[in-house]
Image: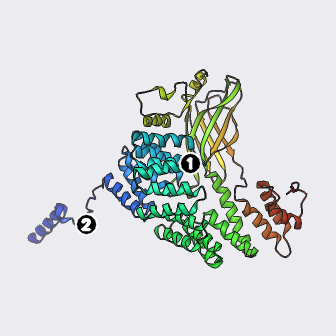
Amino acid sequence: MLVLTALILLGLWFIQKQPEWARPFEPTPTPTLPASYYLTEGDIAFAEGQLQQAVEAYEAAIALEPDNDAPYMKAARTLIYLGDTARALTRAEQAVLLQPDSAPNLAEYCRALDWEGQYSPAFDACDCAIELDPTYAPGYAYLSEVYADQADWVPARTTAQQALDVDFQSPEAHHNMGYALEVQGRYAQAVEFYENAITLRPKLAPYYMAAGRNYYWLGQFDKAADRFGEAIKLDPANPAGYDQLGWTYHANGEDGRAIDALEQAIGVDPTHARAWGRLGTIYYLRQNYEEALKILPTAIELAENQFLSRARKIQILTQVEGLSGPETVPILQGRFEHPADPAAGILTADIRPIRWTTEAPQSESNLTCGRLIARNIQNQIVLASPVQDIAFSRAFSQTTGRATLNLSTGELTLQLNNLPPPRELPYEVQIRYRPDQTEGLGYIQPDAQQRVETQFTIAARASAPVEYYYELGLSYVYLTPPRCEEAIPWLLKALDKDPAYYNPAWAGLKICPTENAPPTPLP
């Protein structure tokens, strides 16, 4: 018995004192991968045309090494190709702030600004990229794009040729020469350069989309469909390829295939308004009005909701005494941050003071062009007239705030702290949309604690393409019997957008007349 008891006690002691090597089920520590690993992974994904995966890898590199400008620049480049220009601009700005003397950083900043419709600062950024490195071909290529977007044809082609002269192997140079020709309607020449870009970078879906677009305008629908099909293979999660393919089939008289492709676009992205609109148009043209009535309301709702997603900045303005009398000037500003997931439906903006100065940045000879641009990004600088009194701006140096915009409801919540009382009139609140549209939301007054907490509702507007409205209205009109009560509001919206005599909505109002119709225009 004593022996048995001793063995039991020895066993209990052994269990309690079990050595580390006897615990085989503890997880093995996983080493953290360095930022350079994710940067390389992003480059590989970009080269393979896997743009979303490239962005995710670059974002992982940023999280691990936030002071390295390279992943910011590369994320900006990739986001532009994905059409997410708001996030691209944010990343490009961060790249410039981290390394303002980098030609690639300035070039991608230029392109992001251009795609956001901010042409003047885009020109400055591209010009600076070329100044910093005259051998960097994308600097010239992106400058060509800025010229082309402003319909400045000769400099667009000249600058694109400079990009080709600097580096004939640059896919950006060939692509943007194609673009400079395309915007002039020279599609046959443009497509040659787009095909060159494809040869140099064969796995980038946007290049195939560009070539397909030009084949479409040339009436070469089979070649267009082939190029859009290649874009879909490379980027199957992007609805744009299916959308363009469907519209090409429709132009070629293949409406059955067109409907299939457009339904695939909607399956990939149910919020893709243009695919809904084109699908509704095809049903309308086929006189399948019942199906058109199911599709077109969704197209209109999505297109109208997408207008708010173009919100870029919020500004607070005050009235000051200018050289020629009272004038309204911005004193606070915030830029809306767009989330990586558009379904989030919420935009936020941190509001900071605008710095007014009468000192011309060009006078600071010790700063490079890149550092001047970085300073302007960081400080929200406005250059005033040398004789303008800017003392008013000092009163807002401690003001901070936040704006939140709900894209589904149109409600904008505004919170401000340390806002001094206005000298005379209340402060004005404005919101700016891409590319260049401003809307006044109303006026605000701070309370006794110099705070503002208020809400504005941004009214819905008829921002969908005009054909969606008249096709929906006419679909009601052409039913048997006509459903005029439902048709008239859509016909009037179409005429509100375009009251010209050739608007098909006028034909609908002949069948469904209303006292609310505008005067009939003369041809």
Q: Earlier in the sequence, mark 1 or mark 2?
A: 2
Give how far across and how far down residue 315 sits, in percent: 62, 38
Residue 106: mark in rendering = none
Viewer-closest of 521 and 156: 156
Asked whether 293 or 408 is in front, the reply is 293
Q: Residue at x 57, y 72 (%)?
A: 264
Give the class, few, some or many, for how many residues have Cα within 10 Å of label 2's Cα (few <14, many ≥20): few
Q: Amino acid at mark 1?
A: Val
Q: CA distance from mark 1 to mark 2?
A: 71 Å
- The local secondary structure at tag 2 comes to loop
Q: Which residue is mark 1?
A: 154
Nearest-to-viewer mark from 1 and 2: 1
Q: Position of residue 412 (x, y in %)?
A: 64, 46
The foreground one among 196 and 207 is: 196
| Quadrant in which the C terminus is drawn | bottom right
- On the rendered image, what quadrant is the N terminus found in? bottom left
In the picture of the structure, the residue carrying the numbered disc 2 is 25
